[in-house]
Amino acid sequence: MNKKIYERPILRKVVEGMPNKFGSMKRIRPINTIDNVLIDDIIDSYGSPVFILSEKTIRDTYKSAYRAFSNRYPKVQFAWSYKTNYLDAVCRIFHSEGSWAEVVSGFEYEKALANHVPCNKIIFNGPDKSKNDLVKAIQNKSLIHIDHFDELYTIIQLTDELNERPQVAIRVNMDTGIYPQWDRFGFNYENGEAWNAINRILTNSKIDLIGLHTHIGTYITVSKAYAIAIEKLASLANKTFERFKTTIKYIDVGGGFASQNTLQGAYLPATDTTPSFDDYAHAITTALTSVNFPNNEVPTLILETGRALIDEAGWLAGTVLANKRLADGHRAMVLDVGVNIMFTAFWYDYEIHPVNESSFQSEPTTMYGPLCMNIDVIRKNIDFPLLNKDDRFVIKRVGAYTMTQWMQFITYRPNVVLIDEKGKLHLIRKGEDKEVFRKQEIVPKHLLEKAELKN
Amino acid sequence: MSKLNSLAISDNGFIFKPSTGESFTTNELGLHIIHLLKENKSTNEIITEITREFEIDKLTASRDLDEFLDLLKRENMV
Amino acid sequence: MNKKLTIAVTGLNNIDSPGPGVPVIRGIKDSNLDVRIIGLAYENLEPGIYMPGLVDKTYLMPYPSTGSEAFLERLSYIHSKEKIDVVIPNFDSELYLFIKFDDELKKMGIRTFLPTLEQFEERHKSNLPEFAEKYDIKVPESIALTSIKDLNDLPKPLVFPYWIKGKFYEAFKVTDSSQAKYYFNKLSAKWGLPVVIQQSIYGTEVNVIALGDGEGNTVAAVPMRKQYITDKGKAWGGITIEDERMLEITRHIIKSTKWRGGMELEMIKTEDGEYYLIEINPRIPAWVYLAVGAGQNIPEMLCKLAMGETVKPINTYKNGVMFIRYSWDLIGDISDFEKIVIFGEL
């Protein structure tokens, strides 16, 4: 006799005002391959959890972003934002596509150099550049984006000491009608600080001011905001040209494009609402082409897009450790993936899928990580299929910031693998083990002796 | 199991509890188990029945049954 | 039109803060259109599902927040059973999906008559100041906030009491900062960000229901004064009024935006005769049946426009027509409830 397919018994109370069965049930379907590679095979070879990056998705995403802008504007240059994901393999993919490097620390600067990025194609951003960093960047002719006056004075001082011509831009913050206004980085436009900085740089005559940089915020699609920002930068460029006969070669509009991850608190899923590269490109290039720059020369447009270029390419596969019922009857699942490696789970509602079909039933479930911490929650209240212990799951769109903001807390950080365009797997960052940490630690001599445990 | 007999249970898996006015839904196996409970079958008998009819091992079946019985108890149905 | 039309309508929640579905259906049924009405409901207990003689069939729908995939899948299932000619969505929260996937619906053979995405986005509560500037309309001071911290730091002209409004629905008048914080959290948790702060203006609440043909013409418009307002800010009684200035503002907005579809303009008329636009709802309001009663059957006209017919504008209506809302206890059977819960259809 053929036995029937087993579905575990369920009992659910019909609660009014709660999503109905037909309402909430977007059935979460299993995802068992990434670029035609079986996720089960990846976990079997590289352990659980494991980060998986798709080289194909990275290249495809980059190409579509580049196309969106270059179809609309003659001079476009992307600079890979290292802080978003600075695994060397990832950076090198972007560089091979033509991206420059955008770094915000001495550490990232060294990484960019080691990845063979030509020095004059490294943008050095951020408020934290040590004197040593600046010396190196000046000697290498890297593009230094000055954040504040103290940094500017250090550069002026170094110019005399080194007898080099630093290549600089200034970061400008401004009121574009966007609220809240980002004013903690760079020089303010409205109060004249930015113009003062330009004057200070160009009266020195030993520094080359080649760019203007602004970043008006995240998730901005209002073309008007870009129009205002670019109008203000253009006016600085024009004033600069009139007074010093210096031509601004590039306008850097920063990053800030949203990925398709849904922010907690958003009503509609981001897959339905996130603007496309075309939307952004339209807003920015329309603004750029409607203002006049000195000599009618259009400046190069630099984009430091991070999140929107890499999020989609990253996956995190893991395993269910346990199922449990909370005191109120609510279902909970404990995963081997915690906020230690998924810091971003604090603000995103990640899309999570089972790797294999296990059940057609689903139930509102809270997903906890394995850490002994109450805050270790990966997803609250997701209508998720019933998985058993040892079943596997995969989290979508984790390419941005996870592999840079993760922390070594309680346990080791896992392997990161890359699927190349031919479907071949490469380990690109080894999972940590105790030797990694033993190497960093030094036990004082008087504690070296094997001590008896005191009762 | 007299409490179960007071429930209005339809073949579609819709359960109405007249004493409280609450409604519940269950699935095919849940319905099956409730019928077996009404016949005063013991937990072991139910597990045997489930493993005979469905493609499932004993351990999983008994774990799921325990959970289901817990839910019934929580709702004061058994 | 002689063909029998199948019209799907959402918003059957005829409760204390009612959706427009039931009065829309009443309007359609009052007309001489030959129709089959399909109710689309989000919750098991939306009264419209159970009202005798109202809908021919109801289907449960996934919430828009579930995402477009599930939403379209369910719609196409319903369409395969019912062959829907026109769908009239009545919730702000679902409009985005209906507008964005208008083309897909059209390919399936389902027609809508909705504003464009630009029109829809532009009139958002959070964009009202820009909207007002662009079209030269007077609005109260307002600001969209994305963080509760910003409540402490509101720009100057905003003072208590002010309204605090959810992205899609709900508004509360607050008089101090602890109330403001309470409602900020409540609204952002329910409807997401931003939350909008709008200066409260003293005056009479007046509304216009209107229908634009998408070419700039106002094909219907009826102004009304709210006579009785519930604690949720909903009109529980209203009366049509003769107010040429309100109609002028309406025609101006429809003409300059080329508005397509139904809309409701919420305004405050101050004692010195100034009109402030408070909100633009991009859909038919729940009090639409008053307009039907006053001589403008907006649901009927909207169906005809959706079917591609030319509709002649109606410029007259009776003033002094009133509506008084009332509640009515339907007697239902649990077997109907069971069908909705188990099968999602009734």
Image: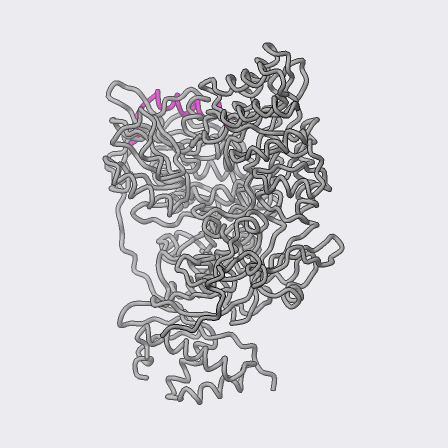
Residue B5 found in image quarter: bottom left
Residue A272 found in image quarter: top right
- Residue found 54% across the figure and 69% down from its top: A359
Q: Is residue C85 visible?
A: no
Placement of C72 over or under A173, stated as above or below: below
Place of residue A33 in the rendered image (x, y in percent of width and height, measured from the top left) = 66, 61
Place of residue A105 in the rendered image (x, y in percent of width and height, measured from the top left) = 57, 39
| Residue B64 is inside the magenta segment | no
Place of residue C30 in the rendered image (x, y in percent of width and height, measured from the top left) = 40, 42
Which color scheme is applied?
Answer: one colour
Q: Is residue A330 visible?
A: yes
Relative to residue C318, is residue C193 drawn left or right? right
Q: Range of the magenta residues?
A: C239-258
Relative to residue A44, is residue A128 drawn left or right? left
Place of residue A93 in the rendered image (x, y in percent of width and height, measured from the top left) = 70, 45
Magenta segment's dominant SS is helix
Of residues A384 and A344, the one nearer the viewer is A344
Q: Spot the residue most to the top.
A: A242
Relative to residue A275, is residue C241 drawn left or right? left
Placement of A433 over or under A131, stated as above or below: below
- Residue found 36% across the figure and 29% down from its top: C142
Placement of C6 over or under A442, stated as above or below: above
- Residue found 46% across the figure and 22% down from its top: C134
Residue C315 found in image quarter: top left
Placement of C109 over or under A3, stated as above or below: above
Of residues A303 and C292, the one nearer the viewer is A303
Which quadrant is the C terminus of chain C positioned in? Answer: bottom left
Q: Disc count in the image?
A: 0
